[in-house]
């Protein structure tokens, strides 16, 4: 499957759709259409035949259980609902999984992986990983391979991009580090860099692709040298 995984999400709560959208952006390699109107959502599913459907159960205009019964028989769908009492009904309809709101990103990943296995996709075809951070009132999707380095500025993190420019987000550097793959190293209390962007290094500084020099903190020097010499 040399294309993005195409998904549709139906939920009459916009905030619930925002969560699914953020999680899909964070995974990368996913195209998502969202609908608060169940009728329009079902029409889009029948017309476009997406790979995966996320379906709320208890909606004002329709029941997700009823919609599930109207889907093409080979549709790969995941129920998302706040009501545990529907779990058995969901599995009786051959749902891939049942996400109980509010669900975490890790739980979402588990359900998504189950859906990929049912589709016969062993892994996401896009190897690019992404993180999603807030800048002002907007959510910014940043591929991790587009990150040159991240700089802590008081309570903010400034994400400098290989493609140019930077994103300033109100998130602590230690917290953004938990969102990143193991390729990223903290080499100073104020700087995180990906190993793949380091051109040269010593105990005092690293030089990144493009010539940017970033200092190495004394307490991080040994960890940095160990990571780069493995």
Image: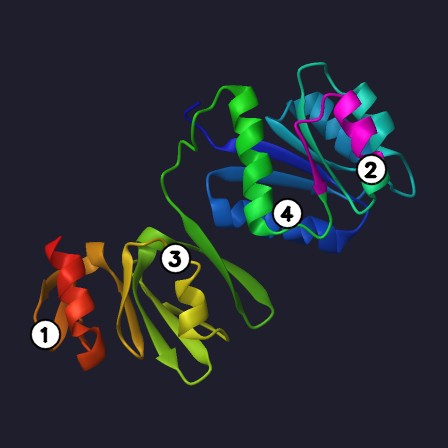
Q: Is residue 4 left or right of residue 69?
A: left
* Mark 3 surroundings: few (<14), some (14-19) or many (≥20) residues within 10 A: some
Q: Residue furthest bottom?
A: 154
Q: Give the residue at mark 3.
A: 180
Distance CA(mark 3)–CA(mark 2): 33 Å
Q: Is residue 2 left or right of residue 105?
A: left
- Which of marks 2 and 3 precedes in the sequence? 2
Q: Residue at x 53, y 33 (%)?
A: 113
Spot occupied by residue 112 in the image (x, y as percentages of width and height): 57, 35
Q: Give the residue at mark 4.
A: 20
On residue 203, which mark appears?
1
Whether the residues at callouts 3 and 1 have beta carbons within 8 Å, the answer is no
The range drawn in magenta is 86-99
Whether the residues at callouts 3 and 4 have beta carbons within 8 Å, the answer is no
Front position among marks 4 and 1: 1
- Give SS at disc 4: helix
Front position among marks 1 and 2: 1
Q: Quadrant of residue 74?
A: top right
Q: Is residue 96 left or right of residue 25?
A: right
């Amino acid at each position: 499957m040399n294309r993005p995984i195409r998904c549709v999400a139906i939920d009459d709560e916009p905030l619930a759709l925002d969560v699914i959208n953020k999680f899909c952006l964070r995974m990368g390699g996913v195209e998502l259409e969202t609908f608060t109107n169940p009728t329009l959502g079902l029409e889009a599913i029948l017309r476009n035949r997406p790979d995966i459907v996320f379906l709320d159960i208890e909606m004002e205009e329709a029941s997700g259980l009823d919609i599930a019964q109207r889907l093409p028989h080979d549709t790969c769908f995941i129920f998302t609902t706040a009501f545990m009492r529907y779990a058995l009904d969901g599995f009786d309809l051959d749902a891939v999984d049942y996400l109980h709101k509010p669900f975490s990103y890790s739980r979402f990943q588990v359900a998504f992986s189950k859906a990929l296995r049912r589709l016969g996709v062993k892994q996401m075809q896009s190897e690019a990983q992404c993180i999603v951070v807030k800048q002002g009132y907007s959510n910014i999707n940043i591929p991790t391979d587009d990150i040159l380095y991240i700089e802590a500025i008081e309570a903010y993190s400034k994400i400098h991009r290989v493609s140019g420019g930077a994103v300033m987000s109100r998130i602590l550097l230690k917290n953004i580090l938990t969102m990143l793959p193991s390729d990223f190293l903290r080499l100073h209390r104020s700087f995180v860099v990906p190993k793949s962007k380091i051109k040269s290094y010593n105990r005092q500084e690293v030089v990144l692709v493009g010539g940017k020099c970033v200092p190495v903190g004394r307490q991080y020097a040994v960890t940095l040298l160990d990571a780069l010499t493995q």
